[in-house]
Image (spheres, grey):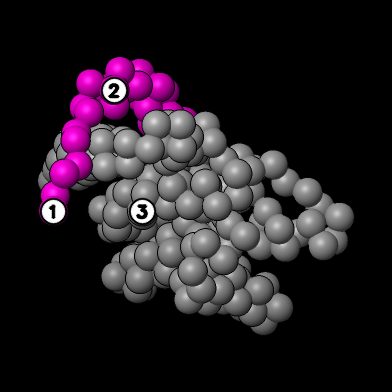
């Protein structure tokens, strides 16, 4: 017989704490995306460099990031590196794991974006006297980022949701960690996690909407 008694007032009273956790969640996601974007560009250049060693490392990174669980990557950062004497805090391990994952997915997005750019543009730029680096920086890179912009938005949403895995390595300052601690003290599982789910939903929807507005403003012909 269903006899559960909802206590929303108790959960809503803790909303400020959960919103503080949401800010930490968003901060981790933004930092991991910034790091991931830089690494993804480097990986993309390595895969196109013609250097087999650099290309092999970059390809291995992408394959591991895209074909292993995100939880595994965070565990390796927090527990796995400890075997070599490298001890990362839960925050750093979570950030490193998500950034590693982001870099792999974004590098593959960038690879796909590059294939959509006609090779004739590169040849035309070189014929005008631009160096290889200038051609990539001024001609190829802006178009690559434009084509990959919306897929990058999807990765940002994934990064936000992936922060919830931080509870498995002792991260307790983000939204999932705060919610778990509140639940452990009150045992109001449904109420707290329902509110957390709504907050995650609102954050990801806000990010998606903001990205569409930015794309509409930047990519008008």
Q: Which residue is mark 3?
A: 158
Q: Position of residue 210 (x, y in %)?
A: 22, 36
Q: Which mark is residue 10?
A: 2
Mark 1 vs mark 2, foreground winner is 1
Residue ID at (48%, 76%):
67
Residue 74 painted magenta? no
> Which numbered disc covers residue 183?
none
**Pointer 2 local density, CA inside 10 Å: few below 14, some 14–19, many at least 20:** few
Residue 154 at x, y = what percent?
A: 29, 54
| Magenta region | 1-26
Q: Secondary structure at mark 3?
A: helix
Whether 21 is among the magenta residues is yes
Look at the magenta stretch and give its main secondary structure: helix
Which of the two labelled residues, at mark 1 and mark 2, occupies the earlier sequence position? 1
- Asked if residue 70 lies left or right of residue 42, the reply is left
**Comparing marks 3 and 2, which lies closer to the viewer?**
2
Q: Which residue is mark 1?
A: 1
Which element is circle 2 on? helix
Q: Earlier in the sequence, mark 1 or mark 3?
A: 1
In this rendered view, identify the residue nearer to me: 6 or 37: 6
Q: Is residue 118 above or below residue 97?
A: below
> Quick one: 82 or 147, which is closer to the camera?
82
Q: Which of 20/110 is in front?
A: 20
Residue 138 visible here: no
């Amino acid at each position: 017989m269903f006899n559960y008694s909802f206590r929303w007032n108790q959960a809503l009273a803790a909303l400020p704490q959960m919103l503080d956790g949401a800010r930490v969640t968003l901060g981790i996601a933004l930092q991991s995306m910034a790091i991931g974007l830089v690494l993804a560009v480097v990986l993309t250049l390595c895969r196109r460099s013609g250097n087999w060693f650099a290309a092999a490392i970059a390809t291995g990174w992408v394959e591991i990031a895209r074909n292993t669980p995100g939880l595994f990557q965070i565990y390796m950062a927090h527990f796995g590196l400890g075997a070599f004497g490298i001890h990362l805090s839960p925050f750093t391990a979570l950030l490193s794991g998500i950034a590693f994952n982001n870099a792999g997915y974004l590098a593959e997005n960038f690879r796909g974006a590059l294939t959509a750019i006609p090779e004739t543009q590169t040849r035309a730029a070189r014929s005008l006297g631009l160096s290889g680096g200038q051609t990539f920086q001024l001609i190829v890179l802006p178009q690559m980022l434009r084509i990959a912009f919306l897929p990058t938005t999807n990765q940002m949403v994934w990064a936000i949701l992936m922060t919830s895995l931080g509870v498995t390595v002792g991260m307790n300052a983000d939204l999932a960690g705060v919610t778990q601690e509140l639940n452990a003290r009150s045992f109001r599982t449904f109420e707290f996690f329902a509110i957390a789910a709504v907050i995650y939903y609102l954050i990801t929807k806000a990010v998606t909407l903001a990205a569409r507005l930015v794309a509409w403003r930047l990519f008008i012909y």
